[in-house]
Amino acid sequence: MPSVPAETGLMDREIVIQPRHPWFSLDFRELWEYRDLLILLIHRDFAVKFKQTILGPAWFILQPLLMTLVFTVVFGNIARIPTDGLPPILFYLSGLLTWNYFAQTVNATSATFTANAHLFGKVYFPRLIVPLSVAASGVFAFLLQLALFTAFWIYFRFFTLAGDRFGVGAGLWSLPLLLVVVAALALGIGLWMSALTARYRDLSHLVPFLLQLGMYATPIIYPFSTVPPSWAWVLSFNPMTPLTEAFKMALLGQGLVTIGGLGYAASVAIAVLVTGMWAFHYVERHFIDTV
């Protein structure tokens, strides 16, 4: 019987199927191959958030502006909490810049599994793409709010008598690096919370409460310089404290910033991000089976 020739090219291929690493696997090349999906998800975050709204992306500006006005009236005029001689609007806006990005990233990332279960069950792609898209899309909101802050900064600096009380700090060049640290910290915490809420759904109600407590444990509505020493060391354990102070130093020239504090914040951010990716990877392998 004559032999049947194999199809051209099939005998030249060798497919190797092997299991992933048992406890952790992060393929950066695979993430890069899905960069088009990342861009699509970033666009989706904007489309879903502002679909059927009147003002659209203007809410990115209105939200911190309204919060700043409330803080100015309640904490500045009624409670008489000092702002280190800075115009209250600039003081509160500079603190909200970092906190809003951090809180929104944590809040959105923590719902990765529960909000995308229908998508995860239909098609394969690196699940880490979803929280990465949240962190990336938040940068655009940060830039819009930074533009709002810049407009107020120019007004108070050149058109009011308070202009000689503040100025651009020497660390202005470090803003992108500081934002990267904040993003890493927020993404790591969000990954941890997404892993936990995938197993225990009721923990999702705890995230907004913890973020609210975290805001009061961060020098946003009060200057860190007015905190008594007996409590200052407690707030120093919050990694957002040195990051917030560094932003104020860069944007306004005032803030208690130390190399040790920034090193501590960066170390915590890296540790939380690495362990958060491990927890996220551990849960994603079995999440669909338990939905």
Image: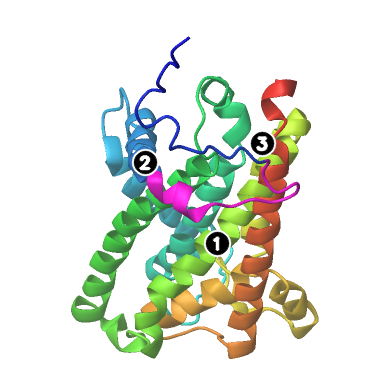
Identify which residue, 214 or 90, lies in the foreground. 214
Tag shown at residue 284:
3
Name which residue lies at 45% across and 17% down. 3
Q: Earlier in the sequence, mark 3 or mark 1?
A: 1
Q: Which residue is mark 1?
A: 184
- Amino acid identity at mark 1: Ala
Q: Is residue 104 left or right of residue 266?
A: left
| Secondary structure that dominates the magenta span | loop
Magenta residues span 19-33
Q: Earlier in the sequence, mark 1 or mark 2?
A: 2
Q: Is residue 30 magenta?
A: yes
Q: Secondary structure at mark 2?
A: helix
Residue contact between numbered discs 1 and 2, judged by CB atoms under 8 Å: no
Identify which residue, 63 or 98, lies in the foreground. 98
Separation of marks 1 and 2 at Cα, in angstroms: 17 Å
Residue 82 figure quarter: bottom right
Q: Which residue is mark 2?
A: 42
Estimate how packed mark 1 is, as few (under 14), some (14 to 19) or many (20 or more) residues with alpha carbons within 10 Å: many
The x, y position of residue 63, in whole percent, is 40, 46
Identify which residue, 119 or 83, lies in the foreground. 119
